[in-house]
Image: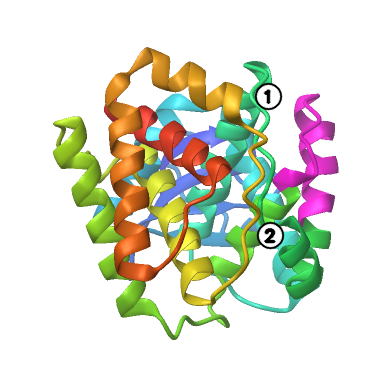
Amino acid sequence: MRIIKIYNNNIASALSDDYGEIIVTGSGIGFQKRAGDLLDESKIEKTYLFQDKSKNRLNQMIAEVPIEYLEIADAIIKKASKELKTEFSDELFIAITDHISFAIRRLKENIILPNLLMNEIKTLYREEYQVGLWAIDYIEKKTGYRLENDEAGYLASHLVNFSLNHGSSNAVKILTFTKDVLGIIEKTMGVSLEENSNQYSRLSIHLKFLAERIFRNEDVSMMDTTGQIRTTLNDSNNKLTICANRIADKLKQTYDYQLSPDEKTYLCIHILNNTR
């Protein structure tokens, strides 16, 4: 394999005869190497293969986030694979890198979003949550930013979502649900969502988790802990209120599910990030 691009000493992209362009990681794999050099395959610890849409998302993300976030995501995946004894979709690399970037940006802006499913995650996905806690410590060690433990829950959710050992019995329902909500957003906000963007991916993942909660008939707290954030967001864009209310009405009528105030806030954040 020949090297296409060096990201840092431990991450590079290479051209494989069997799979085309791949991302490879390993200690010193890019040290004193240049594009066109032969790759020392003995140093490969992990490879990631992405299809066209995912490859475009990865390239966009690499242009936007510090390369160290990719290295952190790779370390978290390796830790999770070892501790959980499972394999993950390569998409997890993108999801975790993006989540780290988004979480640190929110921390810098002093936006704290409590995880509505922390109790369930701690109970149902105890081992994944422990990896998430390890990741919080590791992120602080590498970046100096200490994320809230709620982020460990979000990371655990990603590990569950992208595990090849987990399947969803509600896949068709979730796809229909997501399509319906995205349709409401596009119509109400007067936009065409950019499917290849990282913002769209965050929104889709959020809707998938919401759908899974609905179809598992989980109880949800109606306590409003994010009202001030929601008010600020809606003041900046009046369409957000209309959009969130239309989604809430749809969920009530079609799925007999009452959207909580906090869930409205999270939706508003994702909608705004996709329509700026």
Structural crowding at the residue carrying mark 2, measured as other residues with C-alpha within 10 Å and reported as few (<14), some (14–19) or many (≥20):
many
Residue bearing mark 2:
156
Residue at the location (48% across, 68% down)?
214
Query: Is residue 59 positioned above or below 144 on the image?
Result: below
Find the magenta span and give its range. 132-151
User: Disc 2 on helix, strand or loop?
Assistant: helix
41 displayed left or right of 62:
right
152 displayed left or right of 86:
right
The residue closer to the viewer here, 25 or 187, is 187
User: Disc 1 on helix, strand or loop?
Assistant: helix
Q: Is residue 209 magenta?
A: no
Q: Earlier in the sequence, mark 2 or mark 1?
A: 1
Please provide percent x and percent y for residue 55.
32, 49
Which residue occupies the extreme bottom position in the image? Answer: 169
Please provide percent x and percent y for residue 65.
51, 28
Distance of label 2 from label 1 (alpha carbons): 19 Å
Residue 107, which numbered label? 1
Residue at the location (44% across, 86% down)?
169
Q: Is residue 166 visible?
A: yes
